[in-house]
Amino acid sequence: MMSQRANPDLLLELQAYGAVGAESCFNCGTCTAVCSLTTDENQLPRKSIRLLQVGLQDSLLASVDPWMCYYCGDCSETCPRQAEPAETMMALRRWLTAQYDWTGLARKFYTSKVWEIGAVLALAAFVVVMFILFHGPMVTDRVELNTFAPAHVIEVLDWIMLGGLSFFLLSNVARMHHAIIRRGTKAPVPLSLYATEAWNLIYHFVTQKRFSKCDEEEGGTFWQKPRWRNHWILVSGYVTMFVLVVVFLRWFQTDEIYPIWHPQRWLGYYATIALLFGATDAIWGRIKREHQMHRFSHPSDWMFPILLLLTTLTGIFLHTFRYLGLPMATYIIYVIHLAIVVPMLVLEVPFGKWSHLAYRPFAIYFQAIKEKAQSLQQEPTGALAAGD
């Protein structure tokens, strides 16, 4: 373990991020025994909770364990001390997100409802004001959305936004890499490993496969694993819609009504259904609070699904008004739609809970690099012993 000074206030600090009950844990190991994701390298969640209790902040920063947890809740349900280890792991993910973020905004959003809600409302108001001042001509005898909001202008703004999101998120991932690889790995890491292990990043981002292990008792197929299935549907819908409205906006935002078989329509419909299902499932679960993962809801747990649901509903209204030929209703709902979409993307993707979608596969990627580097370091010793 790296030489470091303990932070006696770390446990108190984590309480601001939603940790509850961690002080009651006496490290019996029951949580690790029942966790389907624990390995020799990643002892979930016992090791992280112990590091938190003794204040070893640098070790937590260098750890990928919190990202390996998908919050199935089994550990909390079996904890003999009701120490809520699953919620502590969730709080650690929020805390790590804030530590990676060099702007300090993630910390403010996670620890202050005023900051998070205020930022969303302020950015939404900015979008509305910009449209009031700079919108194009409003044709009122028919719907001409691309006259009111020219697609080529919105596309440029989309790419500027995408560049900003990429800069903030990737610079935070670079800080994550520094903590996990540069400071947290004793073995030298050959540059070639970043290429040979890159498949881990792509594979786990696309499939979210590790989540399926949380459903082992439910059966073996995709449809028999509800936690993984619902999560994948939500992620796939979000990514599909993001690509359509940012990368292929001129193809997606058009005044031409395509036939039902056109891919523009069925891709849009799939993304809409997936987002509506995923957002509703997340909100309803938190309202009912029947499952362990919904017993404790941090404000940030509500913000993203609410914004996602509002985005989806306004998108449905926009689509409906366009097909009904209602010009003013279309223009107004378009502005409202973007006033919800922009804060969701600009604030939640790099600084909020949706950043976990990037941090998790990167954590798996960095863990694979660390393990491979350690095995390469041990190979000469093993070969020498075999030769003797």
Image: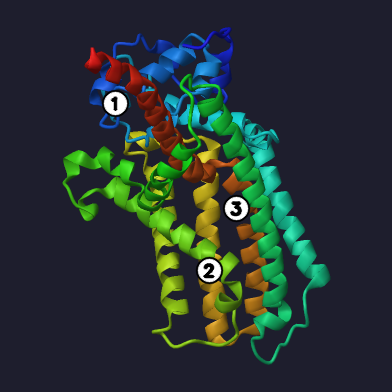
How packed mark 3 is, by other alpha carbons closer than 10 Å (few <14, some 14-19, many 20 or more), is many
Q: Quadrant of residue 377?
A: top left
Q: Is residue 260 visible?
A: yes
Report the residue at 17% width, 48% height from top.
Answer: 220
Q: Earlier in the sequence, mark 2 or mark 3?
A: 2
SS for callout 3: helix
Q: Position of residue 326 (x, y in %)?
A: 61, 84
Q: Is 44 rendered above or below residue 247?
A: above
Report the residue at 38% width, 31% height from top.
Answer: 372
Q: Position of residue 222 (x, y in %)?
A: 24, 53
Q: Is 95 rendered above or below residue 364?
A: above
Name of the residue lying farthest toward the bottom = 141
* 53 relative position to 175: left or right: left
Q: Earlier in the sequence, mark 3 or mark 1?
A: 1
Marks 1/2 in contact by CB < 8 Å: the verdict is no
Closer to the camera: disc 2 or disc 3? 2
Q: Which residue is mark 1?
A: 39
Q: What is the three-letter code of the residue carrying label 1?
A: Thr
Q: What is the three-letter code of the residue carrying label 2?
A: Leu
Marks 1 and 2, Cα distance to the nearest angstrom? 38 Å
SS for callout 2: helix
Q: Which residue is mark 3?
A: 344
How packed mark 2 is, by other alpha carbons closer than 10 Å (few <14, some 14-19, many 20 or more), is some
Q: Earlier in the sequence, mark 1 or mark 2?
A: 1
Q: Which residue is mark 2?
A: 244
